[in-house]
Image (cartoon, grey):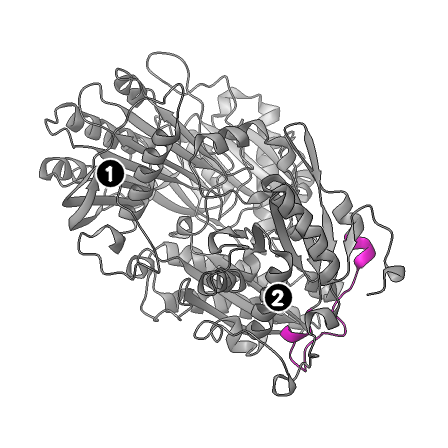
């Protein structure tokens, strides 16, 4: 590219490998880290919002850094925050386009790209970081031997990933990954980055490139410095942001989110324990339904594929697989859909195991002093989170504790009705204390009822304006524009006129849903519900007993005042062990035979070989059950004579509720505080809301609590 044809830019534009290498050498000489974001141009928020990725760490210094530097992370590149220098490349790679594909028409918007990029900045300490350079190599530089879209006519060096490029996207585009891996190898050789960042929307590509760096012994970047960034989506309908969206006509754009909605539904069915073939068939049915609607509007839609694959081998899962059988390897639900002449791709990493390859947005640690456990366990640490969908309890095998825990009988109820009907039911319910949430994968226009008797609506701007009720906008930057409305469940707490207006608004919402999703499938819990009633469901525990396991001996010492490195490492190892135990990882077995080059794992020290029990309740769980389970555990540990005894409790929240926790009063009975509003968050099916509680033995034993929450959550503060 001639420098005379370049648009003006305050960012250095490097148009040859030679000029870039001179720039990179200065960074090497100065010992500065370089972050790299490879793109093909036509930038969008997905390229620029790399701030949504947080590295996999529990180290206190990183945690303190996140807390003190939170504000600048809105819609900016994560690379700017993690590296002293950041480079973007813009290169439309001919080798990844087949002869019949859209190389000539691929959008090229360099002036706009540079304008967007120039506006991005992050403040770290007192330094303001902006993009350091843009690498704009020519086709001749990248392919000195020339390049043809016809693979049979290509000359020169190319790179292939044998055994990993023919599944998923590779099945539909046989030469695609050959072109991607080749060009990224060239870019890595030229750019020599410390860290590289790729979007989850192209999950197979990102995981392939990690493997590329590992197999070819790359030093810049190393394999674990290839970071996968969550997909950025349209705030209103969830469509994954992509340069190809520019091809969609206004009419086609209306139907483009169908693929994501189908994948969301498949993920929900999978999480409920159904087999893979049902997940796929129900997802295809959703596509078919939208396809019929699109045809009426003259829009042609064609499903390329929807599939579920192992995230390490990319092998297609058996039709009879479910998430229990899949083990500790995350599952990728992916698909491709033609909308008109535009091919859209998307994916979801199964929520049941996503924590293995994607880490939460924050990790908050609390540790007790030697006499604090009784106080903390009784003040509602866990039951203050009313929307719980799963509880895992892991402990060194104990028949006594297993018997006590499995004797607990949590119960929830199901009802199909309109919101107006359910509010009427809840307001008349004897004793109150209803906790309710729709069973849905919808994250826009959603609601919940918390145990204080408050109905919280979280709705889009358009629905908010139609309802005409007073609420407030969610305060988070860069998130979908949504509004929250709070309505008391009990009628006597508001005037007759206000209640009439609220009922009219909810009835309007019910009517709007009649031609769409219809009535709600509501899950709800009451403290006084009787098992065996028409709507009551008893949740049966799932018990997994593992033998010959490497079991750690937790040293739950208080957080040190000075040196924290050893404490960080031990606590990090403990939480890693708990996560692997919950997934039934083969790595924990004393006779582990897994290839050590695939996944290296070191057992926490000190440890011993013993038996471990895991008990899981997977359903909508009432906070009274969480308290009963916690009381059972603490009672067992208080009388434990074994110094190696410990219990790990992991609570998984329902992330589609607009609130994640209810504030507690400072009263001795730790009742819910009705004077303070619950902290709000953006509902999201793939968000994080998990708490892990590790408790040690004795009447006044120590404990450690980690909570993982999403960044669009008021509990951040």
- Residue 506: image quadrant is top right
- x%, y% of residue 393? 25, 39
Position of residue 547 in the picture relative to residue 434 (left or right): left
- x%, y% of residue 391? 30, 40
1 or 2: mark nearer the eye: 2
User: According to the image, label 1 marks what residue?
Assistant: 605
Q: Residue furthest top?
A: 667
Give yes or no for residue 99 being in the magenta stretch. Answer: yes
- x%, y% of residue 155? 64, 83
Give yes or no for residue 574 being in the magenta stretch. Answer: no
First of labels 1, 2 by sequence position: 2
Q: Residue furthest front?
A: 29
Q: Which residue does the image show at 54% across and 45% down from the upper left?
A: 53
Q: CA distance from mark 1 to mark 2?
A: 42 Å
User: According to the image, label 2 marks what residue?
Assistant: 186
Position of residue 28 in the picture relative to residue 578 (left or right): right
Residue 714 visible (yes or no): no
Q: Nearer the viewer, residue 709 or 34?
A: 34
Q: Residue furthest bottom?
A: 152
Q: Which residue does the image show at 64% across and 79% down from the upper left?
A: 98
Q: Nearer the viewer, residue 445 or 179?
A: 179
Indicate whether 203 appears above or below 642: below
> What kind of element bears circle 1?
loop
**Circle on res. 580:** none
Q: For the residue carrying disc 1, how many other residues have a C-alpha within 10 Å: few (<14), some (14-19), or many (20+)?
A: some
- The residues colored magenta run 93-113
Position of residue 330 in the picture relative to residue 40 (left or right): left
Please identify the dominant SS of the magenta region.
loop
């Amino acid at each position: 590219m001639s420098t005379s044809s370049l648009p003006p830019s305050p960012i250095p534009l490097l148009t040859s490998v030679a000029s870039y290498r001179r720039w990179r050498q200065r960074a090497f000489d100065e010992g500065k880290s370089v972050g790299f974001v490879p793109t093909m141009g036509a930038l969008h928020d997905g390229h620029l919002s790399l701030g949504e990725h947080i590295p996999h760490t529990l180290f206190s210094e990183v945690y303190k850094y996140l807390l003190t530097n939170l504000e600048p992370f809105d819609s900016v590149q994560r690379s700017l925050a993690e590296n002293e220098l950041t480079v973007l490349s813009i290169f439309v790679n001919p080798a990844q386009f087949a002869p019949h594909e859209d190389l000539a028409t691929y959008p090229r918007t360099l002036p706009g790209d540079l304008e967007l990029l120039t506006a991005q900045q992050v403040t770290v300490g007192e330094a303001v970081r902006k993009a350091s350079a843009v690498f704009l190599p020519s086709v001749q530089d990248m392919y000195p031997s020339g390049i043809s879209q016809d693979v049979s006519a290509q000359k020169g060096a190319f790179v292939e990933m044998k055994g990993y490029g023919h599944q998923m996207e590779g099945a539909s585009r046989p030469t695609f990954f050959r072109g991607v891996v080749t060009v990224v190898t060239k870019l890595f050789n030229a750019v020599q980055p410390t860290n590289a960042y790729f979007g989850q929307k192209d999950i197979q590509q990102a995981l392939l490139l990690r493997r590329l760096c590992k197999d070819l012994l790359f030093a810049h970047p190393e394999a674990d410095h290839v970071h996968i960034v969550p997909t950025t989506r349209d705030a209103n309908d969830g469509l994954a942001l992509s340069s190809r969206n520019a091809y969609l006509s206004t009419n086609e754009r209306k139907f483009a989110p169908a693929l994501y909605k189908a994948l969301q539904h498949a993920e929900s069915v999978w999480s409920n324990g159904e087999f893979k073939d049902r997940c796929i068939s129900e997802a295809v049915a959703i596509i078919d339904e939208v396809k019929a609607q699109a045809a009426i509007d003259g829009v042609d839609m064609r499903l390329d594929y929807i599939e579920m694959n192992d995230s390490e081998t990319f092998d297609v899962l058996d039709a009879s697989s479910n998430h229990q059988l899949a083990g500790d390897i995350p599952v990728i639900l992916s698909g491709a859909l033609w909308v008109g002449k535009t091919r859209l791709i998307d994916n979801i990493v199964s929520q049941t195991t996503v924590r293995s390859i994607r880490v939460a947005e924050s990790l908050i640690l609390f540790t007790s002093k030697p006499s604090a456990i009784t106080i903390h366990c009784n003040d509602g640490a866990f039951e203050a989170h009313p929307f719980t969908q799963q509880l895992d309890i892991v402990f060194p095998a104990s028949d006594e504790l297993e018997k006590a825990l499995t004797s607990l009988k949590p119960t929830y109820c199901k009802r199909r009705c309109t919101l107006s009907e359910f509010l009427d039911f809840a307001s008349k319910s004897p004793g109150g204390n209803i906790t309710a949430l729709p069973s849905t994968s919808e994250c826009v226009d959603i609601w919940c009822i918390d145990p204080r008797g408050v109905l919280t609506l979280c709705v889009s701007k358009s629905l908010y304006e139609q309802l005409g009720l007073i609420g407030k906008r969610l305060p988070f930057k860069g998130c979908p524009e949504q509004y929250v409305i709070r309505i008391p469940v009990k009628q006597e707490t508001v005037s007759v006129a206000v209640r009439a207006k609220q009922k009219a608004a909810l009835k309007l919402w019910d009517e709007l849903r009649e031609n769409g999703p219809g009535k709600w499938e509501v899950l709800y819990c009451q403290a006084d519900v009787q098992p065996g009633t028409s709507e009551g469901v008893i949740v049966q525990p799932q018990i997994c007993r593992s033998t010959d396991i490497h079991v750690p001996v937790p040293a739950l010492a208080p957080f040190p005042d000075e040196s924290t490195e050893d404490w960080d490492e031990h606590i990090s190892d403990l939480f890693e062990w708990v996560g692997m135990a919950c997934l039934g990882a083969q790595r924990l077995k004393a006779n582990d035979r897994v290839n050590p080059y695939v996944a290296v794992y070191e057992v926490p020290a000190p440890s011993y070989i013993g038996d471990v029990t895991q008990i899981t309740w997977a359903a909508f769980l009432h906070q009274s059950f969480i308290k009963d389970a916690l009381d059972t555990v603490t009672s067992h540990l208080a009388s434990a004579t074994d110094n190696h005894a410990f219990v790990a409790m992991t609570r998984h929240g329902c992330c589609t509720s607009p609130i994640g926790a209810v504030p507690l009063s400072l009263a001795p009975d730790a009742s819910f505080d009705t004077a303070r509003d619950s902290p709000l968050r953006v509902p999201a099916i793939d968000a994080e809301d998990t708490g892990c509680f590790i408790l040690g033995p004795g009447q006044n034993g120590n404990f450690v609590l980690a909570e993982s929450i999403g960044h669009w959550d008021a509990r951040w503060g």
